[in-house]
Amino acid sequence: MGTPRKTLHRSIAAAAALPLLIGALASCGYGSDAKKDDAPKANVADDSGKKLSASEVRIGYFPNLTHATALVGIQEGLIAKELNGTTIKPQTFNAGPSEIEALNGGSLDIGFIGPSPSINAYVKSKGSNLRIISGSASGGVKLVVNPEKIKTLDDLKGKKIATPQKGNTQDVAFLNWIAEKGWTVDPESGKGDVSVVRTDNKVTPDAFKQGSIDGAWVPEPTASKLVSEGAKVLLDETDLWPDKKFVITNIIVSQKFLTEHADVVEAVLKGTVKTNEWINANQDKAKASANAALKTLSGKELEAAVIDPAWPSILVTDDPLASTLKTESEWAVKAKLIEQPDLNGIYDLKLLNKVLKAAGKPEVSDAGLGVK
């Protein structure tokens, strides 16, 4: 299903979230504030071609490696190049709920976001507010532990392991892994054979250094930050999935904007497809570009000890890996975090498949969850 896997060393992604807890806020990054960015010159395309139907497109994303397609595509002007004079108005977010709020409120048109807030927003609006129109990233989630306390997977029993948030992608995956081990944990409290400690990614490294947690099931770059503090990778979640792929970041669009400006959405997708191709063909340059974008957005770039191991574990991909989103939602149902959601129509991949076909690339699947 989807494009052949190319690597960012092995390729790229990192965390995002499938809280699947309907009504719960799904954190997908660091904090919850949004920041409007002054559009750099790279975001204003050559207007010599045919004008599109909107003068600007407002694109939201996180200052995170999991959003490398946006970081690099905007930094390098690869998305703007396809827009024929339509200006990109970038806006950065540190959590999924605030990005969804902007999309629903009409101040954002297109967003890069994790599967969790996508599902929550789609289900809560009864399918009226957004569509997933493309994939963006896969992988980049690891179980890292204190090697003095935990040497094997069986040693996790009785230990305190952090996840980013109750019901988020990593939390659901860890609860499912625990259940498959035959151990029990109360999904609400996190108490049981393993203590699941819900901890914001920003403070997890400090919690690890202080000894209040023994390890963490977390996305990059948090996992590599913990390793730089003395932790050891015990398990890469990628190894638990067929084909070693699972969704961590989607591209979503306001249904209103998609209806009124399909030509702009198509142009953005042309840019993201070309960005992913460029990233996979220029690994070192892309890593440097992403880090430069992070420095511009947050004032600080990632240290080599963090970005160098984090980058190869993330796969940038046009394929939304829809079947894995379906599986993650089933895990959340099994954990009794949510009732069975109706996800029919959450995907609209027509424009993406049009772009892929024109580029001579394989079309991708919506796993039966596309618009009819």
Image: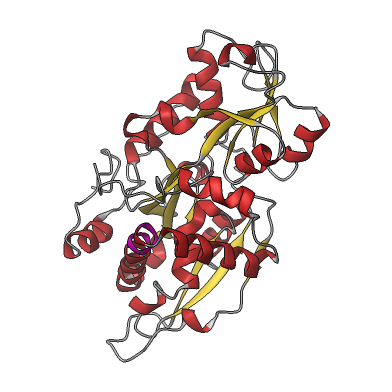
Q: In the image shown, does 176 or 311 lie closer to the viewer?
A: 311
Looking at the picture, how far across and down is residue 233, in whole percent? 58, 30
Tell me if residue 74 comes above or below residue 172 in the rendering.
below
Residue 36's quadrant in the figure?
Answer: bottom right
Quarter that holds the N terminus: top left
- The answer to whether residue 279 is magenta is yes
Residue at x 57% of width, y 36% of height:
168
Q: Position of residue 139 (x, y in %)?
A: 45, 40
Residue at (55, 25) in percent of width and height: 174
Q: Is residue 175 above or below residue 218?
A: above
The residue nearer to you, when weighing 280 against 363, is: 280
Model colouring = secondary structure
| Residue placed furthest toward the bottom | 48
- Is residue 324 positioned above or below 357 on the image? above
Q: Nearer the viewer, residue 14 or 198?
A: 14
Q: Residue 96: percent from the left, percent from the top?
A: 58, 50
Residue 277 image-quadrant placement: bottom left
Is residue 264 in the magenta section? Answer: no
Residue farthest along the top direction in this orientation: 182
Q: Please provide percent x and percent y for residue 224.
A: 61, 42
Residue sitting at the far right: 210
Q: Determine the image quadrant of residue 85.
A: bottom left
Relative to 181, residue 162 above or below: below
What secondary structure do most residues of the magenta stretch adopt?
Answer: helix
**Is residue 111 shown to the viewer in this render?**
no
Q: Which residues are magenta?
A: 276-280
For this view, does 87 lie left or right of residue 158? left
Which residue is painted at 59% across and 42% down in the image? 26
Judged left or right of residue 317, residue 159 is right
